[in-house]
Amino acid sequence: MTLPIQPDRFLSDLHTLRGFGAAGVGKGVSRRAYSADDLAARDWLAAQMADAGLAVQFDPVGNLFGLADGPSLLIGSHSDSQPEGGWLDGALGVVAGLEIARAARAAGGPAISVVSFQDEEGRFGVTTGSAIWGGALTLGDADRLTDYDGHSLGQARMALGDRAGGFVDPARFTGCLEMHIEQGPVLDRSGDRLGVVGDIVGIRDLRLSFHGEQNHAGTTPMALRKDAFQTLSRFNTLLNERFRNVVTPQTVWTIGHVDLHPNASSIVPGRASLSVQWRDGDRDRLDRMEQIVRDSAADAAAETGVEVRFGSRLGLDPVAMDARLAGHLADAAEAEAPGAWRRMPSGALHDATNVSRLMPVAMLFVPSIGGISHDFAEDTDEADLLTGLRALARAAVAAAER
Ligand code: GLV
Ligand code: MN
Ligand code: MN
C-alpha cells in the first residue's frame, strides 16, 4: 500500500513551523526549549495533530505527543532548536511524522502517532526531554539542571502551565522511526540521497570551572597571577596532547561554551567556566577520555595555582538501531533512491538514542547542503526532503504490517 502523502502540505508546514523563531539569514531559526517561540510552535503543532484526528498530550517536560488509537508506530523528532539553528534540525522529523499520520488516517491505516520531544538541543541537558521519557534521567535530577544563564529546568518548565499532563505510556507504541538531516558532509559529498543509520555515537558533556584571582591587569606581575584564562589555555593544550594516544579519526571533542569573568580587557580573569564535550562510538574510550579530561583540568589548575571545580556531567552511551526497522528503511531507501543510499553511523545525538531503551527504533538521514548544521545556514534540497518523506512513509507501512 502507498500512503497518500501530500508533498506540498508537508513543505508548507515545514515553512510555517520555521516562522516560529525565524532568525538570522536564510532559513535560520532560534527556538530554544521553553521559550515563547518554542511554546507557540508546540501549540501550533498540537493543533495540527488534533486536526489530524490524533489525541494531543503534553507530558510534564513538554514532550508533545499526537496519539493514534490503540497500538501504533511512533514517528517524530524534536522542535526546539539551538540558539543559532536551522529550520530542519528536528523539525523535519516532526513534520514528516505529522504528514505520514495524516495520510495514514486518510487511507484508513496503519495507526501512526507523532512526537515532538523537548530540549533535544540541550539548553539544560543532552536530549533532555527524551532522556527523561526513556528513563536515562529522572525528572527530579533534570529539574536541577541549569542553562548558562542560571535558570533551572524546574523553573523553565513552569512555562508549560496547564498544558502539562502525565507521561505517555511507551507500551502503546510498537516501534519508532525518526527522520533527520544528516548534519554532516557524508551524503552531500558522496552524492547519496538517503542514509540509513546503523549506530548513534555516545556522548559525555562535562561542565567545569577554574577559580583564580581577579586583579589589575597593569599592576599584577606575571609571576604572581592566578589567571583563570591561562589555566583554561593550558588545559586545552594538555587535553589535545593526551587525547592523541586514545582517539580514532572518528572521535570528536569540543570546548563549545566559555564564560570568562569578568570578561574585561584590563582585568586578570578570576574565573573561567566552560563545557567540555566528547563523542565516540566506543563506551570504554569515552570513559578513558573522561579520566584524561579530569586529570588534565586538575594538572592545569595545579600548574597555574588555580582551583578547579567539576560540575554536572551528562552522558549517553552509543546505541545500535533496531535491525528489523533499519531493514525496512533500507528497503524503502532502495525503492525511492535506487543505488543512491548508504548505511552510516550518526555522529549527532538524537532522541532515538533514548527511545531505544523503550522500543525498537531506527533512523533515516537526508543530506545537509555543504554538511552545515547548528548554524542559520543549514539547509537541504526540497527534492531530498521529499525523497526522505516518501521513503519514511514506505518504511512506516512495512513496519506497521510487520
Ligand atoms: C544534537 O543536536 C547534537 O548535539 O548532536
Ligand atoms: Mn536534531
Ligand atoms: Mn541539533
Image: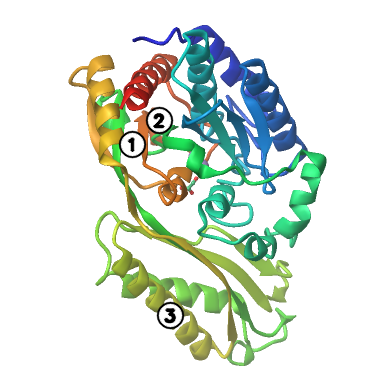
Determine the CA span between mark 3 and mark 2: 35 Å
Q: Which residue is mark 1?
A: 185
Q: Nearer the viewer, residue 48 or 313?
A: 48
Quadrant where the N terminus sits is top left
The residue most toward the left is 339
Quadrant where the C terminus sits is top left
Q: Name the side, left or right, on which 226 lies relative to 185.
A: right
Q: Name the side, left or right, on which 31 lies relative to 200.
A: right
Q: Position of residue 363 (x, y in %)?
A: 37, 36
Does any portion of residue 25 appear in the rendered image? yes
Q: Secondary structure at mark 1?
A: loop
Q: Position of residue 151 (x, y in %)?
A: 75, 59
Three-letter code for the amino acid on which mark 1 is drawn: Pro
Does any portion of residue 21 appear in the rendered image? no
Callout 1 touching callout 2 (CB < 8 Å):
yes
Q: Position of residue 366 (x, y in %)?
A: 37, 27
Q: Nearer the viewer, residue 237 or 93?
A: 93
Q: Secondary structure at mark 3?
A: helix
Q: Which residue is mark 2?
A: 368
Q: Position of residue 353 (x, y in %)?
A: 42, 49
User: Residue at point 50% right, 73% down?
Assistant: 233
Q: Nearer the viewer, residue 120 or 29?
A: 120
Three-letter code for the amino acid on which mark 2 is drawn: Ser
Three-letter code for the amino acid on which mark 3 is drawn: Ser
Q: Up-down: is 127 above or below 41? A: below
Q: Which residue is mark 3?
A: 296
The image quadrant of residue 148 is bottom right
Q: Up-down: is 344 above or below 278? A: above
